[in-house]
Image (cartoon, rainbow, N blue to C red):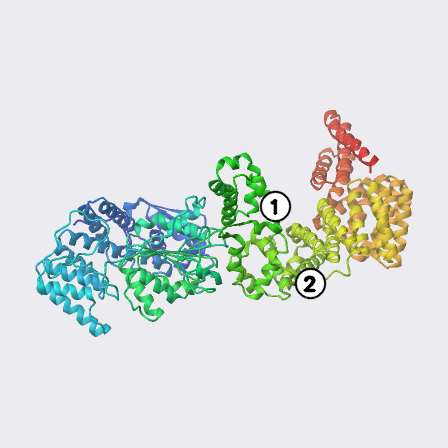
Amino acid sequence: MTVEKPTFSVLGPLEVRLPGTAPRLGGPKPRMLLATLLLHANHTVGGDELAEVLWPDHRPRSTAANLRTYASALRAELGQAPARIRALGAGYAIELPPHELDLLLFEERVTAARECRARGRPDEAAELLARALALWQGVPLADLPGSPLWDRRLERLAQARLRAAEDLVELLMAAGEYGEAVGELRALLADHPFREDLWRRLILALHWSGRQGEALHAFGTIREHLVTELGIEPGPELRRAHEAVLAGEPPPPPSASHGLRTDPVLPTASGSPAEPALPAAPVSDRAPVVPRQLPPDLVDFTGRAAEAAALTRALVPGGVAVVTGPPGVGKTALAVRCAHAVREAYPHGQLYLSLGGTAQPNDAAKPNNTAQPNDTAPSGGAAGSPVEPGELLAEALRALGAAEPLPPTVHERAALYRTLLAERPMLVVLDDAAGAAQVRPLLPGGGSAVVVTGRRRITELPGAARIDLDVLPQAEALRLLTAIVGAERLEREPEDAAAIVRACGRLPLAIRVAGARLAARPGWSPAVLRRRLDDETARLAELRAGDLEVRESFDRSYRLLPDDAARTFRALGLLGTRPLPGWVVDAVLDRHRSDDVTDVLVDANLLRPVGTDPLGQPRYRLPDLLRVDARDKAGEVDMPALARVVAGWTAAAEHATARLPTTVFRLTSPAARRWRLPEDALRRVAADPVSWFGAEHETLVEAVRLAADAGLAGAAWGLAATLVPYFDLRCHLGAWEETHRVALEAARAAGDRAGEAAMLRGLGQVALYRDRYAQAAGMFRSSRLIFRTLGDVRGEAVSVCGLGAVGQFRGDQAAASRHFRRALGMFVSLDDRSGEAYARQALGRTCLSAGDLTGAADWLGGALRMARELGDAHREGCVSLQIGRLHDLAGETGRAMRAQGRALTIFEGFGDRHCAAYAMQGLGGLQAARGDWRHGSARLESSLAIFRQLGDRSGEAATRRLLGELHRSAGRRALARGYLHAVTSRQVVEDTAISHD
């Protein structure tokens, strides 16, 4: 036979054949790079995998650069080859047609041979197999050092070669070509000297080709090897072949058509056919059993296209795939569906074993090996514990026809199991695994494929493809509900159908239960079930239909948790819907370094990692329905954990707030608990407090609500008050108001007067910023009265400052001055120098508004000196803004611009965009006044954009007015009208609102 020589060869030494030239591939590393790409031809190999192959011990710092160099050199040498090396993302791929690589050509011919055989064309099949095997020139890549990352691919290739050779032998013997079969068998036995089935076929092939002496010698050879080296006698099938030679039994007639692999039939001495030969192992005397144990596929299986494709690709001979995910997510359903999709490739049978990884005490009464939809498959083992590997192996061996008694030990049963499946490769489904230790003895190796399902993440099986399932996307979840209920009912109420799916957390089991309930109640509209599911406290009770129950499925995982993990799971259910940083588990357990407990929940697929936030903190969240279940399981015993978490948020927020530019009106709750975070978490907070607040903003708002709902009034208002400086800095008025209203209600319900006063003071500031002056004044007066009753002088002073601001914004400078002077006296009595600096600045601003430049200069000068003495740069910036106004009113434009520029520099240094916008406004107006229209209008436009983004309506109106005047003085009347009209329209709306305030 003429053997074609493709351009690239890996089925032997690495070779590249180009017309008229011998490419120089370089040293071992470029050759190993090329070999790795060829082993995975037409697929991308990641940079990390390539680096592991080339530098298994110590990677150079310039790994990526070295890979680029080697890849470039290979491209240059392979310029004439019909292949292309491409850089794709962080990896590389070689692209080439199958006939240019012996590996792909081998696989293509083997596939074509099987198709020919299935269609009744055995001669073509034999020819294709012979041509496929002729491509092998020895051990693949024997001239290279090798790599552990090649092993899985090379092992599959070796198995594929063995199966192809065995198929060719069967075809030759079935066609009566015994002489050719002898040559193929001797080659196989050189690599597999103890395979009794191969020796049996060799003995028969020699006998039926007229070489009885060689046949008897072959039997003597293998018997001697077995006795002297293994201490065993030949098995029954080998002895039967020997008896056939001695009896001179004739060969069976040649077959014209051959389908799936069959063993030759040995005639008995009487001339009637004997039973088919079986492997040399303890087996029964009947014909080989072909187990077909796959549970039925779900007719309404929906979605999972990408996951199904990945799993199907992994179920090749020798492949192992692990499907994991939370309870009810559809692991069994996906595994069974994909097993049905590939079962024709495993004609010797399909095994299904339920490993009972989440067994419960009442499971023993349930039928075994029945796949329930979406991961409620029962256990077949001892009640309340996973099935032991020895029991599972016994079940598998009986399904394979092994004779009783079975070997007594797990090791011996596993060896027999592997032996039987080496002869008859099958598809094996191992459902509901407890972990890798339970699975390992059940891995057959060889040409069988295995799919494992389990709730626990199983990552310890080398080379296994891992498929982690999450809940369904909304569209796929709706399609599943539609498939169960019917499109007509759901199309009438699409919003209710979507709400049902969301209430089910897009979890397949929950959707199936909800669909079953609707299907069983044709008189219900989807709105009825939606209303019943809206109540989270009763949701899991609603999600039950017959023997399908979401809560019971969750309980299977929960009952397997250690105590600390169970406590943490329950407590996390009390902490709302937001993703949480890892330190929260520390607070729940009241100890640091609780990563081990977090890992238990993550590995059990009860807690989902959801990435890393901008500060490098890993984030976690409970899936929606699991959160509902955890909250339902929580009791009074778990409330201290919630309190510690809120105390942790309070401590962290205080740590961050202390590092913000200004905290002048910050009020604290002495009664609120603090729980100190781990030092590494506090370092991240301190390194960038504004970014930390940005990352945790929504979680902190939810923590206030959770504390209030739990009756932790002091914790609720203490945390809300701590957030005020950040809310003020970023103009988050909505969150500010929300947290304070929630905490105010909690404080009033608890009779916490200090909390009531603090929250009223904060709400008054929000009203002031929103130009609701009467409302603000009322809240400031109420908070002042409570603080005075409590004897809290500083709280009263802060409230009085609010009344001064209201007077100033209303244009009542006399009232404003009285309030600020009163507050100044209080701050001085407390030796609160920061408060004193603020009050002096406020009095200076009041004097400016009243036209008293001398008084303003005095107050502002004192405030500036005090700010510098305190090292309060932000206060210095605020005072500088007013000093710029002072110089402007005095006609000292240059000095005014320098003061405003100083303020802008300070605010931009702090990242305080809000105050910076006021500095831009002042500086832009001054630049325009000096005739620098271009720079002045640019600064004003920048400040306007910030005011609009932050929702500062007063700042926006003032800037629009300046821009309108600027454009009008420059003759741009249309532009001026646009800006001034917006200001006028807004003023009408505000005047109306104030009249009702």
Q: Amino acid at mark 2?
A: Trp
**191 is higher (above) or lower (below) than 703:** below
Question: Which of the 4 image quarters holds residue 139?
Answer: bottom left
Residue 191 visible in the snapshot: yes
Percent across and percent down for residue 484 are: 47, 42
The kind of secondary structure element at disc 2 is: loop
Percent across and percent down for residue 538 are: 60, 50
Badge 1: few (under 14), some or many (20 or more) residues near its Cα, within 10 Å? some
Horizontal relation, residue 133 to residue 396: left or right: left
Do the CB atoms of the residues marked 1 and 2 lie less than 8 Å apart? Answer: no
Q: Amino acid at mark 1?
A: Asp
Select label 1 or label 2 by which is in front. 1
Residue visible at 81% across and 33% down?
A: 992
* C-alpha span from label 1 to label 2: 35 Å
Badge 2: few (under 14), some or many (20 or more) residues near its Cα, within 10 Å? some
Judge by depth and name the residue closer to the eye, 246 or 66: 246
Residue located beneath label 1 in the image:
534
Residue 805 visible in the snapshot: no
Judge by depth and name the residue closer to the eye, 681 or 866: 681
Percent across and percent down for residue 377 are: 44, 55
Residue visible at 57% across and 51% down?
A: 541
Percent across and percent down for residue 688 are: 66, 55
Residue located beneath label 2 in the image:
675
Name the image quarter holding the C terminus: top right
Judge by depth and name the residue closer to the eye, 890 or 205: 205
Judge by depth and name the residue closer to the eye, 545 or 108: 545
The kind of secondary structure element at disc 1 is: helix
First along the sequence among labels 1 and 2: 1
Horizontal relation, residue 586 to residue 860: left or right: left
